[in-house]
Image: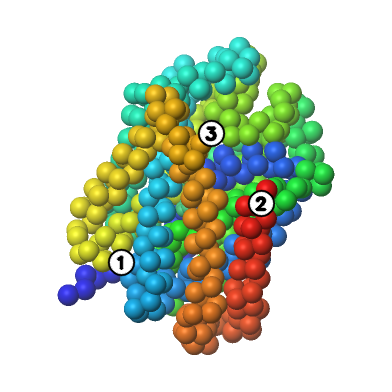
Amino acid sequence: MDRKRENFGSRLAVIMAMAGSAIGLGNIWRFPYMAGQYGGAAFIIVYVICSVFLALPIFLSESIIGRATQKSTFGAFRQLAPGTRWSSLGLLTVITPVIILSYYSVVGGWSIEYLIKSISDGFHSGSITDAASEFSQFSSSTGGPVLCHTVFLMGCAIVILGGVKKGIEKFSNITMPVLFMLMLMIMIYSIFLPGAGEGISYMLKPDFSKLTPTAVAAAMGQAFFSLSLGVGTILTYSSYVQKKEDIFVSGLGTAGFDLLFALIAGFAIMPAVFAAGLEPGAGPGLIFETLPYIFAQMSDVSPVISSIIAVIFFISITVAALSSAISMFEVGVAYLVEEHRVSRRKATLAIFSFAWILGIACSLSFGILGEFRISGMTIFSFCDTLTSNFLMTFGGLLFTVFVGWKMDSAIVRREFTNNGTLKFNSRIYPAVRFLVRYVAPIVIVTVFVTNLFL
Ligand code: PHE
């Protein structure tokens, strides 16, 4: 009766696929502008602490649930806690990634548009304000952004249709190393620009005065978002991990690559921002307003190099966004296939349709639907705020509480240590358990409540 479940082929494939999920707009778009807004190195220090003591335990919790049950979110909770309300958490974590997918795909679509722009006629904005208004003109229009969002989502669907091994694994095995090389090239180019030194020291010298409680909450939220936590993505991917693999090593590998990639993106972007004489705290417009202006400036000096760098940059961001979006897509598809026994093709179509329609609403909320507000927010900001500020943190909290307090501790230990055969994991197990049971939940609740009052 059970269809044979697919697995990732090797340890490297697991890390590549998980890194594919983790490395995305969060690293190239969000991290640099947040580091820019919240004091450079000061923010990075808090971010690293959050990654190790909060994000990693949640990552491991999701891995333990997924690999122990070899099921997608909903089925996993039903198996481990039958007849309880925990399966509603399973359902929540099916819905959250599809909501994220909807607005993420809109931004993915913008990067496709900017890729096309950089290939065709390049960037010629006169001033930074021109670049900003060019972007707002594009994002608030109707046809173009919706078309790009559609193309982006179709790209995800094609990979998803290929399945776990021939789709997801193959895609990330090819794109991740390429992405790494491309971003590294841009970073090297950027740090050698005249005037880049100030940007480098901004990223290295902590400015603790900017480290407000909001900045700390932002660092935590960013650690969640960047490692794709709290929404069942890591759980679902872990359900495809073979029993012989070491989930601690894949967790550490993924978190390590993710951090390294965020730093490379930061060091690729900040020095260029300073070299162009701009402010580091430009916020979300950094990628689509500040960078095109920088590319335009560079093209006055050398048009060829400027277009090559621009093309490489927008290819990187599009590919990184694709591999993350694919992982959000897979959560819903795995759920429909396993729980509702539909074919992968039908499941893909269902998730596509949902994300496509909600994504169109998100896209139009920059233009003709701009007046439509939910709790005072546009549809796009509402989806973003609801998921990244609430549902992801809430999901992460529940995963750690489940693994720390509800799940049979014998299963937890068995999954983490591969039945006691992994000596190192057996030794660190008590520390990991402490982080999962106490540290992660307490810190999440504290930051969450503080944030609510701010
Ligand atoms: N981690 C991805 C990024 O950094 C975003 C993501 C969130 C992916 C949730 C999957 C699930 O862009």
Residue behind mark 2 = 453
Label 1 secondary element: loop
Looking at this view, is 192 or 240 the one in front? 240
Q: Amino acid at mark 2?
A: Phe
Tell me where residue 35 appears, x and y as whole percent: 69, 42
Tell me where residue 382 appears, x and y as whole percent: 48, 41
Label 2 secondary element: helix
Q: Which mark is residue 6?
A: 1
Q: Quadrant of the N terminus?
A: bottom left
Label 3 secondary element: helix
The residue lying at 61 percent from left, 17 percent from top is 129
Q: Which mark is residue 313?
A: 3
Q: Amino acid at mark 1?
A: Glu
- Label 3 vs label 1: CA separation? 34 Å
The residue lying at 34 percent from left, 78 percent from top is 83
Residue lying furthest left: 1
Tell me where residue 266 appears, x and y as whole percent: 66, 41
- Indicate left or right for 154 with 271 as reference: left
Where 410 falls versus 84 (above or below)? below
- Label 2 vs label 1: CA separation? 45 Å
Q: Residues within 10 Å of mark 1 (few under 14, many from 20)?
A: some
Which dot, 2 or 1, sits closer to the camera?
A: 2
Residue 67, picture quadrant: bottom left
Q: Amino acid at mark 3?
A: Phe
Looking at this view, is 450 or 325 the one in front? 450
Q: Earlier in the sequence, mark 2 or mark 3?
A: 3
